[in-house]
């Protein structure tokens, strides 16, 4: 990727949490780049570190428990990790915004939804209260909610409608980067499809870059351009959506695809990846996936580098399954 095309550059990011006297290694040397207007999918199971990465980009990691010992998060030449809280207040909400996982807890139950959207607008614009209200109504209409519902409270909306309000709030200031943290997890399948389609349309309309955090490969196929597969706080495979879906290289990625049920598959029971993710307070030496891997060799006890196996397609593995190399 050419330097001029890079909008967000996360470089060798490490994040640790202190919990009951132990150090939790949540993110371990993560690096990726995002182009303007593109969507990157962060894929991995629960506890892989996806949300921690997003919170680090937003600058909302808990101050007491979290520590970033190493790394850079560069947004158009500015390292956000070196920015003051005052500087981040100007960036957060205006240039970078986030859709949180649970719309039920993302909205304040005692304030009208329109006022919550208008508040976000007033914080980042020079307009008056009336202009902020007009923008809030405009955003409600944009996500398919009548402007007349500006004065309604969160409890008067269904789960899907609440998530639309959260999306309206996130996009109200036309952010350049949108972080979507599993935005459809709390919704039923039909509403999921509607919300994903709406996010994609709004992203294209506003030319917003996006990081989609999910454990659902179907969502990745639907909305992402590039994919980073994360395991135990580390990217194990990275490349374009087409390359990773057509030629998965890492045993963990192959396992994820193998676990997807399909009508054409003849099986008595669903496939799973044997074993459990490692304890983040006591990570194994070398490859973090080695204890669960059928292709593990002695060399896997060493730290595994990311290697470009195919053009633009990187993998962190010493002994990739041979059938996937062909």
Image (cartoon, helix red, strand yellow):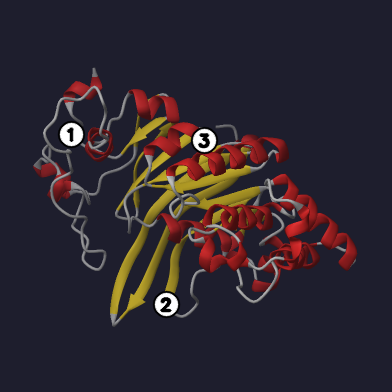
Q: Does residue 178 sit above or below 128 in this rendering?
A: above
Q: Which dot, 2 or 3, sits closer to the camera?
A: 3
Q: Of callouts 1 and 2, which one flags the residue occurring earlier in the amino acid sequence?
A: 2
From the image, state whether disc 1 or disc 2 is nearer to you. Answer: 2
Q: Residues within 10 Å of mark 1 (few under 14, many from 20)?
A: some
Residue 120 relative to residue 159: left or right: right
Quadrant in the rendering for residue 256: top left
- In this view, the residue in front, 59 or 133, is 133
Sequence order check, earlier mark of 1 and 3: 3
Disc 3 target residue: 223
Residue at 47% in and 44% down: 32
Residue 226 image offset from top left, x and y in percent:
48, 34
Q: Which residue extends farthest top?
A: 326
Q: Position of residue 249 (x, y in %)?
A: 28, 30
Residue 299: x, y in percent?
Answer: 14, 42
Residue placed under numbered mark 1 in the picture: 319
């Amino acid at each position: 990727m050419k330097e001029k095309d890079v909008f967000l550059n996360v470089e060798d990011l490490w994040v640790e949490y202190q919990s009951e006297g132990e150090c939790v290694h949540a993110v371990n040397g993560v690096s990726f780049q995002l182009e303007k207007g593109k969507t990157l999918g962060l894929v991995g199971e629960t506890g892989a570190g996806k949300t921690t990465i997003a919170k680090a980009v937003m600058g909302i990691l808990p101050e007491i428990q979290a520590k970033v010992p190493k790394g850079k998060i560069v947004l158009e030449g500015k390292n956000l990790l070196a920015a003051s809280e005052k500087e981040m207040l100007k960036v957060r909400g205006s240039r970078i915004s986030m859709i949180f996982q649970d719309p039920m807890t993302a909205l304040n139950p005692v304030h009208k939804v329109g006022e919550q959207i208008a508040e976000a607008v007033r914080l980042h614009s020079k307009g008056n209260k009336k202009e902020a209200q007009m923008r809030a109504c405009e955003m409600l209409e944009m996500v398919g909610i009548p402007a007349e519902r500006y004065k309604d409270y969160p409890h008067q909306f269904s789960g899907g409608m609440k998530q639309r309000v959260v999306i309206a709030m996130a996009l109200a200031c036309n952010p350049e980067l949108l972080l979507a943290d599993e935005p459809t997890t709390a919704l039923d399948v039909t509403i999921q499809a509607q919300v994903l389609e709406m996010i994609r349309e709004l992203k294209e309309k506003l030319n917003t870059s996006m990081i989609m955090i999910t454990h659902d490969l179907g969502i990745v196929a639907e909305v992402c351009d590039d994919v980073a597969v994360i395991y135990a706080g580390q990217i194990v495979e990275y490349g374009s959506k087409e390359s990773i879906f057509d030629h998965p290289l890492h045993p963990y990625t192959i396992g994820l695809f193998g676990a997807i049920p399909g009508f054409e598959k003849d099986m008595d029971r669903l496939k799973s990846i044997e074993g459990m993710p490692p304890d983040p307070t006591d990570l194994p030496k070398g490859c973090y996936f080695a204890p669960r891997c059928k292709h593990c060799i002695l060399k896997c006890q060493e730290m595994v580098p990311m290697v470009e196996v195919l053009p633009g397609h990187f993998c962190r593995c010493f002994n990739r399954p041979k059938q996937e190399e062909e």
